[in-house]
Image (tube, helix red, strand yellow):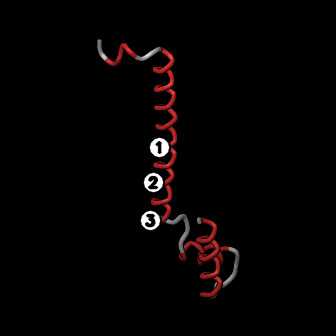
Amino acid sequence: MSVILLLADGAWIGILIASVVAALVGGFFLSRWFFKRELAKNPPINEAMIRALYQSVGRKPSEADIQRTMNAVKRQQK
């Protein structure tokens, strides 16, 4: 007889549940890694966007304002 027939029904159910849980956990961490990598490559905001934001509210941004805002955005991403 083969090994397949020697396992009880409960063992098959346990193996199936363990496989599904392992796939879900692996998928979660893999998608999290991809998402972080894409955010690092393509940040959602850059200095030109911050400059345009300041100008749209009628302020002339200094370089310090832009750097401060960029640092705040980077801290939020971590």
Across and down, in percent, residue 73 comes to: 61, 70
Across and down, in percent, residue 27 comes to: 47, 43
The answer for how far apart the CA atoms under marks 2 and 1 are is: 12 Å
Tell me the number on the disc at residue 26: 1
Q: Which residue is mark 3?
A: 41
Q: Residue at x 50, y 31 (%)?
A: 18
Q: Quadrant of residue 53?
A: bottom right
In the displayed structure image, the side of residue 50 where residue 29 appears, left or right: left
Across and down, in percent, residue 70 comes to: 59, 76
Q: Which residue is mark 2?
A: 34
Query: In the rendered structure, which amino acid carries the disc numbered 3?
Result: Lys
Q: Nearer the viewer, mark 2 or mark 1?
A: 1
N-term mark: 2 or 1: 1
Q: Residue at x 51, y 38 (%)?
A: 24
Q: Is residue 19 above or below residue 71?
A: above
The front one of 6 and 60 is: 6
In the displayed structure image, the side of residue 55 where residue 42 appears, left or right: left
Q: Nearer the viewer, mark 2 or mark 3?
A: 2
N-term mark: 1 or 3: 1
Query: In the rendered structure, which amino acid carries the disc numbered 1?
Result: Gly
The total number of labels drawn is: 3
